Each structure stands twice: as structure tokens, then as C-alpha cells.
Amino acid sequence: MKKSTLLLAILVLGQALHGQIATVIPSSTSIALTSVADTHTWSPFNNPAMLGYLVSPEFAIQFENRYLLSELSTKSVQLALPTALLNTGISFSHFGYSLYHEMLLGIAFARNFSDKFALAVQFNYYTAYFSASNAYHGAFLPQIGLSVRFSKVFSLGFNTFNPFQTNIETEFVVKRVPTIFSIGTEYFFSPDFVWRTQLEKEVSSNYRGAMGFEYQLLKNFEFKVGAYGSDYLVPCLGIGFITGAFLVDLNCELHPLLGLNTLAALKYRFGK
Amino acid sequence: MYMFGFLICSCGVRAQDAVSITEQTIADIFEQYAAESDENIEYDTFYEDLMFCARNPINLNKATREELERLPFLSAIQVENILAYVYLHGPLVTLYELQLVEGLDMTDIRRMIPFVVAGEAAETNRKIYWIDLLKYGKNELYFRLDKGLETKEGYRFLPEEDVNAPQTQTGNYLGNQLYSSLKYRFHYKDRIQVGITAEKDAGEQFWGSTRKGYDFYSFYAQLNNVGKFRTIVLGDYRANFGQGLVLHSDFGLGKSSYVLNVTPRNSGLKKCGSTDESNFFQGGGVTLQLKKFDLTAFYSNKWIDGDTVNGTFQGMIQTGSHRTPAELSNKHTVNQQIIGGNVTFTRMNLQVGATIVHTLLDNKLRPDKTVYNYFYFSGNKQTTGGVFYRLRWKKLNLFGETALTGHGARATLNGCYFNPVSQVSMVVLHRYYAPEYDTFYASTFSETSRVTNESGVYIGIEVRPFRKWKFAAYADSYRFPWPRYGIDAPSVGTDCLLQADYTVNRDMAMYWRFKVEDRQTNLSPAGAVMPVVVSRKKASMRYNLTYSVGHFGFKNVLEGNLSRRATSEPTYGILASQDMSYELTVIPLKIDFRYQVFDAAEYDNRIYSYEKDVLYAFSIPMYYGLGSRYYLNLKYKLNKQFSFWFKVAQTVYADDRESVGSGKEAITGNRKTDMRLLVKWEF
């Protein structure tokens, strides 16, 4: 009973909310999911161009819980390896539980072109477990990212996930895989205070607009606030800590209808 | 001819003095607050408090946070920045130095100037002598009359079908159409304030079988800084503590284009001379200052209106109208006793306090319970207590309050102001008010007028990217976890606002305001077993341009909105107005004139528009239908003692309606005309 209720909940949420069909894509640690122009953070399966700006290897794990239901959680890991020629990143994400789950594995290649812009391409393999056929089915999906630095304080980002709208077709069902186009801006009022905006479209959902502010209050403490909206306006708050080579991010969103969404991320930066 | 001579005799008075500039500044500030409000916000207290500040300017070099918080247009961040500037850099030499304070622009400074000074610190608790009261005390007397020209249904005493029916049995109004109020005010610096208010609403009897004299009387006396006593109040007063979750009966802040000013000010005990007949305490209270502690105790005993039957009543009646036998039968039927206290500890970066209030009614409040008001308070005893805090840490100003009622219902409000860079100020506020939390005197940030059954997050931001530009925006996402009036199911909503202000120069300013509201409303009939709620969206835009040329002042407003319920077709509302004011140089006469047209077919598209009025009055009429409105407002300052205000306004509907208003307030025809006269005598 519990399992079927959960399945029903996932389906209903998937229908009702934008972005819920993209639950396998981990939320970014950038506040209000404004990662597309965040030149300081590479978030898995978000804009891969940000990988190009990394100068040292890093490893991160992330856990995201939706609406206090453990079955609606997304877990992810990522590893970035910068080199002189290309920066390479590997990421993996898992959403769901035993009866229903989706997984995403990706490898990204990015390059920073003289700090003027960064370009990246990512190859993802998406797979989901279908209980009807008791089997996994999957598909390859490309992803392209771009970040342009117009000045030291202003930059623009663009990202597309699954631009060819590839879906998974099985004997019984057609599983839609999200296709997302995102564009956003980043503006530094000061080195400690950044403002980001993002406009996003998942082809079968409403537009999503987002805005976020991140403020480095202390050397090792960051305060984040923002909001995004499509069908509902969702306010977001977060904090970030830096202790040596470790970065910890704790974000939360309060959906007016569904409740609390929380995210915790731990990142280790080699050589710091 | 006599009138002409009368006017000429008073030529010595300057056409535009400091007082009229201050009055205009106060009205402008209030308009910003009230422009988006559907509620009738009390203007007379707002005006009186700010006018008091103008007459007793706040010395910035000695000001406390509480004193600066009397200026409602200053955000909490600006207050903190002024205090920090004086603390770090020493006393201000001149007000021009305010330009160096972070987060203050020229518009803010211009608004502040009438209410502040930068001078030597004066002794605040000098002994008061009777001779000083007589010599330096200021007396003011205000007399106001209002009258509608058209006869309303409630004044038609003799129905055609029964010409012999006695007046008291027809259910019509017992009194005449005149509204009248009389106010006396005395103040000696900022130390002593005494006032008497008397009021008769239109339709109330002034002299007759049911009443001899005014319907409502009010008296207050307030003494400040008397020995260890910070404040002593007697008569009618109000009490405001913390963030307003337990006790706040004064002018409340909420969502407005002052996006950073979202929580009430902690102003303690304060006299009340308002004509509002319900929102005050009656008795006395004191605030004692003991080093860093302020201790307050107060008691109130007053009669309130209620539909009392057999020792119970369904609700408090707060209209203050006693025009018909039925309304009179509800007058002063319930005795309300209130006792409460507060303790507040204040240090440089920290303030914490606790408030408790207990109410005892001599009749039981028993609302007629349905689903939406299932959790409304019932009984005759209510106790509410709360703790509040304010903490400045680095650039963060944290604030909040948590309150509990006697039967365990909770409410909490917490937030943070911060000013990361000089051009940007922000506020984030979270609130949660349980459906069971229903207390009499709470008034704080809320989507509705009741502080109950709501949770949400508000984010406000103000950015000054360039010298003449200011952008203000807020987003508020909220939820009602229990049905409320008009919505038979739990519901959610969103409000967003963006305002861009451009100040061209001293004589010209404009702003654009965009607002989007998304709320839910019943689709199914009220009380349906399976209620269905749908979205109701409204987007509105306003362009406001003010400019002056010599003694002429102009203002243009263009406002429009689009509203849509669920999948139905959108409906629109439009309003356009032209204001003109002129100050004569030969006589001290100021003339304000407005002409406006409106076209808002549906109630959902109604538009509120502020208009100038006589002193102590403030009109924000609501427009819907098709029509026009015009008014003429005159202010004449005869000499230093006497000033006169006169206003006449008329609304003409062009949508073929045969009556204006409804019930006893209905007027036959398509016109509504109002006149007001106010006389002020200073001595």
C-alpha cells in the first residue's frame, strides 16, 4: 500500500510540478538553483562549462531530500580532474528507491578559453528501472554548456540538457527524459556579494524564473537567499562553510504546497 | 467683499511654510504605505505621531533606536546604520553629513529633514515647572464637519407605505448626515501630551432621545522621562511590544513599496487620541527604566460593542457606528479588562524581551462556528505571552518573536535584515501562525488582517545601482493550512512587486510599479462538501509622475490591472488621473484639484487611489465601475492661530447605474458628493 501510494505521489508530483520530471538531475548548491551562470561552482549535470574554470581537482557528494520523504531523495557524487588541455568531470546521480529509481552517469569535458569564456560538452547515460518489465532501460543524452565572462563582475551562462529530446521507449511505456534549456546571469556587486538570475524551460513544463543572492559574511561563512517560481513561488535559504579543503553547503526550499526540500553537499578540494 | 478684505489682511503669512511642507511629506509617506492596502489604515495617529516629531525633532546625536523608529519610512537597516555612524564617527556636525551614512539616499534624507536635528545633546529629564507649561506649552483645537450632499436610504425616515411609523421602528438612522469631530491637543516639548477627542459619525444622534452630545469621547495624558519613569500614560493608550505577535495595536507595517519595513516598531506605551472607537486600551500604564531594563505594566478596563444575548456574544463589533436602534443595542454590552506587562533588556547589539497579556470579558465570546472559523477563540479569558529578540551580528540584523496562547497555540516570526554592500539592502522573513493561534491584540506581518492560520516566507530587496535610481522588489510565498473566509480549503498564494523610482531632480520624480498576485478562491459554492479552489491571478501596473513648476505642482497617475479567475477570460481595470496644485503668493491659500477617470467593470479589478484631503483625514477611495471623480481641496492659513481646510469631491458613474452604494448607504442616482470642513486653532 505504502509503495503504491508513493508511486502515485511521484506521478502526481511529476505532473503537477515543473522540474519534478528532472528529479534525477541533482539540484545545484547555487541558491535557488541558479547554477547556469555560477562561475565558482560546478554542479553535477548542471552547466558543465563551469568545470572549465576549475584549477584543482575536487570531489563532492550531495544528498537532496524532497518534502521529507526519503523515497524522493537524490544522491550524487562527482569528481573533477583539471588538466592543462581539458578539464574532465565524472558525475553520477541516483533518484528514488527500490521499486522506482532513475540513474544518471555523465562524463564532461570543458575548457576555459583565456578566461573570456568556457565551453563544455557532457555525455550522459540515463537509465531507469521499470517494474512492469522488471528491467532497466536507458539512453545516451548529450549536454552542452557555455559561460561567457563579459567583465570581471558580469557573466552569462547557457546550458542545454538532452537537446535532441531523446526518450526511452519500452514495450509498455514511453518514459520522457527531461529536456532543459537554461540561461542565466551572474553579477558581483562586490567580491563578497553576488547576484544571479536564471530562466529555464523544460520543454513540456512552464518557464522557471529564479533569482539568488550569495553573501560571504565571514571568511569561512556564506549566507544565501533567493527564490524561484513557475507554478508556485518557492523561497530558498542556504548557508555555506569553508574549513580548509572542505566546503559544506546546506540549502533549503519551502514549497508552499508540498513543504520543505533540503540539500546537503560536501566538497573536498585537493591541494587547498 | 468682506471675504476679499479678510484674505488680503492675512497676506503676511507665507504661502508655503515649513508646516505645510511637513504635512505634504507625511501624506506622501503614508501614501506609499497605503497605496496597496485594501484595508482602512488609520491616518490620524500616523499624522499626529510624525507631526509631533516635526515639532520636537529627534536629535540624531543623542537618538536611541526607539526614537529613530518613530520615523516609519526608515528601515531597520537605516536606523542601525545611523546609530552605528554616530557611534563610530562621533556626533554629526550638520545634517548634510547624513549623505555619508550607508544606505541613505537623497530622497531618504529629504524625508528625514523635517523630523531630525543634529545638535548638542540636551538634558531629557529636566524638572518641569508649571510656568514652563503655561509659557511654552502648545494648544491646538480641531473641529471637523463632513456631509454627503445626496440623501442616503438610511435617512429617509418615513417610508411611503407607513407614513406614521415611528422613527425608531423603521430601522433607519436616528441622527442626521453630519459627521463631526472635535479634538483638543496640548503638548509641552516631548515631555507632556494631553488630548481630548469627541466624535459623532454620520447617522448617529447628537441630541435626542438616545444621546445627548457626541457618541464617542476619548481622553489621554502621557508624560515622558519623569524621574525613573520613561513613560506614564493615563486614559486611552496603545501598547506595542516586540514584533507584534502578542501586542500591537498601532499603525502596522506590512507589504508595501517600502519593501524593507515589514515588522512593527517596538514603541511601548503610547497615548491614543484617534477617532477609532475600538482599537485602544483605557486605563493606565507605566514604563520604568532600570539601567538596561525597561519594565512596563498596564491595566485597561473598558466597554466594548458586541451582539450580546444571554451572557454570550458572537463577535466584537469594531465599526464604532451607533446609528440605528439595532446598532445602539450592541453598544458597550461587554466589559473588557486587560492586564499586561513587558520586560525588555537592551544592549548595544542586543535586545531581548518578554510580554504577557491577560484579558477578561464579562460575557463569553462564542463565535458561530463553521469550518473557516473553527479555531477562532471562544471563552471569556485569554492569556498570551511571547518572547522577542533583536541581535546585530556582523552585517546581519536578526529579529523575531515567538508567542504562545494559554491553550498552547504557537506563532513565530523570525527574520534577518542585511546590507551586504552600500547599494543593496535585503530582508528575509519567515512566519508561522498556527490555525489555533487567535489572540485579540496581535498585529504583525501577515497576508490577512488576522494573525492566524498562515505560514510563509517574504524576501525584500532594495537596490540603488545609480545615483537617481532606486529599485525595490519583494516576493512573498504563503500558505493557509486551514480554510479561511471565502476559501473552503487549505490554499496557497504568491505576491510579487517591483518598483523602479527615478528622481530626475528636486522638481521631478517618477516611479513604475508592477505587482503580481496569485491567490486561490472558491470555485465550488461556499460550504460545499468537496470544496474546489482555483487560482485567481491579478497583475497590475502603475506609473506615477510628479513635477512642479514655480508655484504649480502636478501629478499624473496611470494605473491598470488584469485579473483572471481559473480559466475564465481576463478582465481589466484602468484609472487615470491628473492632479494640479497651486499656492497663491498674495494670500496664504493652497488649492489642490484632481480629475480622474476609471473603468473597472469587475470587483476583482477595483483600484484604490489616494487623494488629498483635509488635515487628519486621508482618503483612499475604491473605484470600480465606469465613471469619473473630481475634487477640490483648499487650505487657507488665516494667521498664526487659525487655519481652514475645505474639500468637495464628486464621483459620477457612467455605467447606467440607478443607485450608488447598497443598503442604508444607498443613494438614488449616479452621483455621490462629499464635503468636508476642518478648522484648526493654535494657541
Image (cartoon, coloured by chain):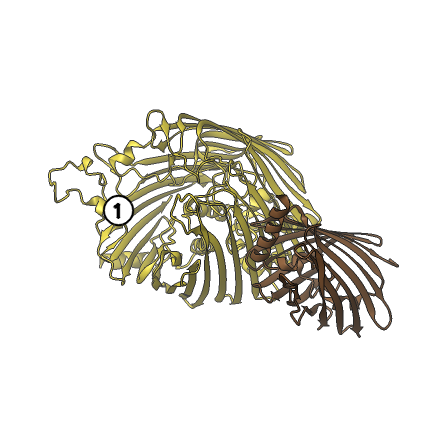
Query: Which chain comes out yellow in the rendered image?
Result: B
Q: Is residue B46 left or right of residue B459?
A: left
Whether residue B216 is situated above or below residue B546 in the rendered picture: above
Chain of the residue under label 1: B
Which residue type carries mark 1? Gly
Image quarter of the C terminus of chain B: top left
**Colour for chain A in the figure:** brown
| Residue B395 shows in the view | no
Q: Is residue B457 left or right of residue B273?
A: right
Question: For numbered disc 1, what is the local secondary structure?
Answer: helix
How many numbered marks does the figure carry? Answer: 1
Q: Residue at x 37, y 27 (%)?
A: B312
Whether residue B365 is situated above or below residue B453 in the rendered picture: above
Residue picked out by circle 1: B663
Q: Residue furthest right?
A: A271
- Percent across and percent down for residue A143 are 71, 69
- Residue B544 found in image quarter: bottom left
Whether residue B102 is situated above or below residue B484 in the rendered picture: below
- Percent across and percent down for residue B407 are 53, 29
Instruction: Mark 1: give few (<14), some (14-19) or many (20+) Cα within 10 Å.
Output: few
- Percent across and percent down for residue B482 are 49, 42
The one of B541 and B23 positioned closer to us in this rendering? B541
| Residue B77 shows in the view | yes
The one of A203 and B479 positioned closer to us in this rendering? A203
Image quarter of the N terminus of chain B: bottom left
- Percent across and percent down for residue A60 are 80, 56
